[in-house]
Image (cartoon, grey):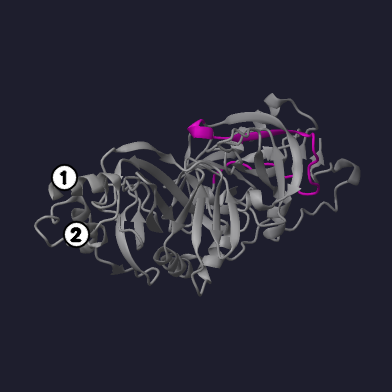
Amino acid sequence: MRRFLLPLLAALALPTTVNAAKINCNSPVWKNKPQCKNESVRKKVKTILDEETGLMVIEMEADIPWRSTSNPKIPYKNIVKLTSSFDGSSEYVVFDRDYIRGAFSRFTVLTKWSSDYLSATYFLENDCSYVFNTCFGGISDSGELDSPIELKFNNRNYTLYGEDGQFSLPNDFIEQVKNTRSYTGLSVRGNNRIIPIGEVTVEKLSELYKKVLKKWTIPEINFKAKNIKLKPSIKEIAGNTLPKVVTVRSSRGQGTGFFINDEGLLITNRHVIGAGKKIDIQIETATGSELTAKTIYVSRKDDFAILKVQGEIFPEALPICYATYPTAGEEVIAIGSPRGLTNTITRGIVSAFRRSGNYSEGFATTGTSLIQTDAAINPGNSGGPLLNENGEVIGINTFGATSSGGSQGLNFAVSMIDVLQQLNVRKPDLKNINESSINECGNIKL
């Protein structure tokens, strides 16, 4: 009778004396089971002292397939140094795995936390037995967490929008975790579930953030007013602008950037290049020429970065609208490389001009000026210019607030004026220019 009772209880996931016992991986019964194989691999992983940060880390390749419930090589709840075989860059992350258990199911969430972003994927397994800590029905559903998600830490909530299961982490959240002294709970709300994140993971993130967050010195930046033809055609704007817009490639993927002065400085989004150690960043111009750049400044507050292109020959700067903010209803043009399709132009209007709030915490601090537009901003557009009807840059294309509910046309660019103010950039000297020749943006009318 006992021979039939135990399997029945296991299938029903009812508590028994076996359920309370800890698995002994040294026993001949369990040592070859998947649970113990994974455990033995993790126990063999050794931490080493990272000379660059002083952290105790586990070194791994950046392209490790971590989105798998059965990958025994993932060292959860440890600081991991990932090095890219693509460009030699490195980043420091913490992996976490958490479960939500139903009567006969298990919802598993795998997360990857860095100083820039959170990536999250899930698996739903059926016919689960908690007696034997396994699921017999296999995976019935899987994918990335839908946008938006919500983080809750120390009684504060953060709403994050993202793409393909990756979400930029707000600077305020990172600072809060870095300076935390007592654990009061971290959870992620996504796909109509609340996923608790373990205390050890938060401790490792706090340790990580204290060591890897770099304080950047604001560079001295000068730019010039440009000669502007009023209300040129879209074709003319494209012809003048595309040679000055570039594709930015890093181990994180690719995005867009554009030159802001004639001395080889270009701007892009921080989340395009990440905050990891970079050897070089590859730049491709509209003509296919390859350039190399280095990061000289990163804003964690408003998601932008300044790069210095090496060499002496590079495209000219775009004209910048630095004297006035746009207004609702103005026509705009977004330029970038969505999904790798370079030199893509989309049109729209300024839907609204607003201050950042909960909806934009992953990309801008509260109070930053954001330009809302229905011009499409997709992955790859990030870091590209948002232009007014004269071809002047009014913002940096930053994110689209798409959601699983189907919201469309909610795209945002960080105001160029706010970026220049954060960089303490002085306005061009126009004392010798007739005032009637200066347009609203501060450039010179032809």
Q: Identify the amino acid type marked 2.
A: Ser
- Against 98, is 341 above or below? above
The image's mark for residue 40 is 2
Bin the neighbour count of mark 1 within 10 Å (Cα to Cα): few under 14, some 14-19, many 20 and up: few
Q: Quadrant of residue 200?
A: bottom left
In the rendered image, residue 136, in percent from the top left (x then y), is placed at: 26, 40
In the rendered image, residue 381, in percent from the top left (x then y), is placed at: 57, 38
Residue 110 vs residue 436, the one in the foreground: 110
Horizontal side of residue 330 vs 90, given as left or right: right
Horizontal side of residue 366 vs 140, given as left or right: right
Q: Which residue, as the protein is rendered here, is positioned at the far left?
A: 28
Q: Do we see residue 296 in this rendering? A: yes
Q: Do we see residue 283 in this rendering? A: no
Write down the residue under mark 1.
Answer: 4
Magenta segment? 313-341
Q: Are marks 1 and 2 in contact (CB under 8 Å)?
A: no
Q: Identify the amino acid type marked 1.
A: Phe
- Against 56, is 91 above or below? above
The image's mark for residue 134 is none
Question: Any magenta on residue 100?
Answer: no
At 34% from the left and 44% from the top, the residue drawn is: 104
Bin the neighbour count of mark 2 within 10 Å (Cα to Cα): few under 14, some 14-19, many 20 and up: some
- Sequence-wise, the earlier of marks 1 and 2 is 1
User: The residue tagged with tag 2: helix, strand or loop?
Assistant: helix
User: The residue tagged with tag 1: helix, strand or loop?
Assistant: helix
